[in-house]
Amino acid sequence: MPTPLKIDFVSDVSCPWCAVGLSALEQALDRVKGEVQAELHFQPFELNPKMPPEGQDTGEHLAQKYGSTPEQQTAIRENIRQRGAEVGFTFRKEGRGRIYNTFDAHRLLHWAEHEAGGKQHALKKAFLEAYFTHGESPASHEVLARVAGEVGLDEARARQILASDEFAAEVREREQYYLNAGIHSVPAVIINDQHLISGGQPVEVFEQALKQIAGV
């Protein structure tokens, strides 16, 4: 019998290393299939909770937040693009034009887990691809509702949620829970509520950790 593991993947849909980390984790889980039975939950984290819906130019934002130069940003972007390619995730070569507010995306992810069971993982992947691969805004209700429909969720229900404040309190509560637990950077992968793996690690790191924790 495979060993059951609960995995909480704390992340933001505007975090490039989260896209890398999720793809690597998926490959690691594929490698340990038959030995480990993973129950994957996506938990909300906002890198820029105060970002207005219209967003901000990426270069300007990164310079303000980290003091990085355009040259440094280009080098980091290329590094992320290569790391993504290694695990099968495609980043646009030109990178992200803008950084957006992602709170509404997290509300739909909460809905996908708790009301529309079984689609949260697919929705998370689709949101990451919409932003990083196709350059679409994760703050746009049109984009969010369309993507929800594309993964098999009820698009009309998604639009209804986006037009209201449904699941806002629940998402804020989850975000605060992880902040209080000391999570201040993502991705943060928490296994069985006690083992933390930080960052977009290589497939081998996740595979080794999964085997060690599962005792296989």
Image (cartoon, helix red, strand yellow):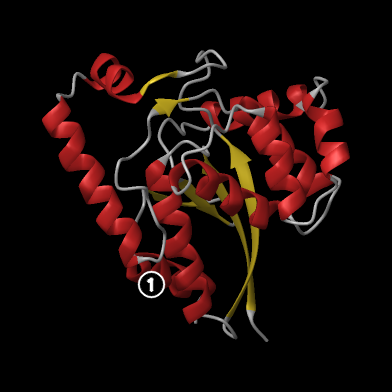
- Image-based side of 19 in relation to 8, left or right: left
Where residue 156 sits: x, y (%)?
Answer: 87, 38
Q: Amino acid at mark 1?
A: Gln
Query: Residue visible at 33% across and 62% down?
Result: 85
Query: Residue visible at 60% across and 51% down?
Result: 126
Q: Is residue 141 visible?
A: yes
Q: Quadrant of residue 138?
A: top right
Location of mark 1 (residue)? 208
- Image-based side of 78 in relation to 205, left or right: left
Q: Nearer the viewer, residue 26 or 87?
A: 87
Where residue 119 sits: x, y (%)?
Answer: 74, 56
At label 1, counting other C-alpha atoms closer than 10 Å, the crowd grade (few under 14, some 14-19, many 20 or more) is some
Which quadrant would the N terminus be assigned to in this image?
A: bottom right
- When the figure is inspected, residue 143 is found, relative to residue 60, above or below; the finding is below
Q: Quadrant of residue 127?
A: top right
Q: Is residue 106 visible?
A: no
Query: Residue visible at 46% across and 34% down?
Result: 183
Tell how many labels. Answer: 1
Q: Nearer the viewer, residue 149 or 177?
A: 149
Where residue 117 sits: x, y (%)?
Answer: 82, 55
Local SS, label 1: helix
Q: Quadrant of residue 174?
A: top right
- Image-based side of 181 in relation to 116, left or right: left
Query: Residue visible at 16% across and 27% down?
Result: 70
Where residue 185 sits: x, y (%)?
Answer: 40, 34
- When the figure is inspected, residue 159 is found, relative to residue 163, above or below; the finding is below
